[in-house]
Amino acid sequence: MRMTKPLAAVITAFAAAGLAACAAIPPEPQATATPPDGDGPMVAFYGDSYTLGTGATGADARWSTIISADRGWREVNPSVNGLGFINNRSVFGDGDLPSIIIDAAPDVVIVTMGLNDNFAYERRPDERDRIREQIGIDLNRLRDGLPDARIVVVEPFWYTDARPDSVQIIIDWVREGAEAIGADYIAGASRYIEGRPELMAADGLHPNDDGYAVIAERLDVEFAALGL
């Protein structure tokens, strides 16, 4: 069912929801990611709650872990609730997620960031250019720090049928950043769970196990098309 609220009200509602979701959650990773043992390729995920698996009944139900288990990947997933390229972020450089991922020296990096920057876009209009700039900075750091790694950038996820203008703007910036570093880009992810409330957890913000299974199924097809 599509929402009929005026767009301004929708923006206020989702911004408040995003802030509530971030409450009492550490905005930065508290430890380095430890690469798992094994012989498969090491794949690192740079993401927010939708890649951390918030709303799932356990880590094994999140899409990144489903795909990693099926493909024999060694998953490194230091994703953080509420994190954006600038949203809910205080560390830029040593100690942030890009540096943790670079230190892990993965074979593949999958970037799924951008959803939470819609909240920053609405709250801080005078700093909107910073989102675009930081997208480029982060992606270039990953490319420079991991010159031999395959980098795959996924269109930012989204969680409501209502789509403020910022959603497409940030999607375009992320795609632009991916193209600038020669990364693979997967389009369409913002609509994977659109119009399907049965795929959402009780908080109304994150997917449930079925929602993550749908995301895993869709991305598995995309990764296969890229030869991963």
Image: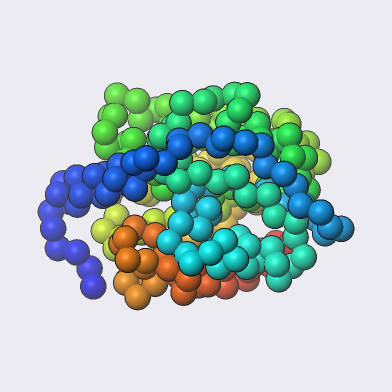
Name the quadrant containing residue 114: top left
Q: What is the x, y in percent for residue 92?
A: 54, 25
**Of residues 9 and 155, which is closer to you in this image?**
9
Q: Residue at x 53, y 54 (%)?
A: 51
Quadrant where the image shows the C terminus = bottom right
Is 225 situated left or right of 24 in this image? right
Q: What is the x, y in percent for residue 130?
A: 42, 27
**Is residue 1 positioned above or below 97 on the image?**
below
Is 135 situated left or right of 69 in this image? left
Q: Residue at x 53, y 64 (%)?
A: 58
Is 110 situated left or right of 22 in this image? right
Name the quadrant containing residue 84: top left
Is 30 situated left or right of 204 in this image? right
Q: Is residue 152 visible?
A: yes
**Is residue 69 positioned above or below 9 on the image?**
below
Q: What is the x, y in percent for residue 10?
A: 19, 52
Q: What is the x, y in percent for residue 107?
A: 78, 48
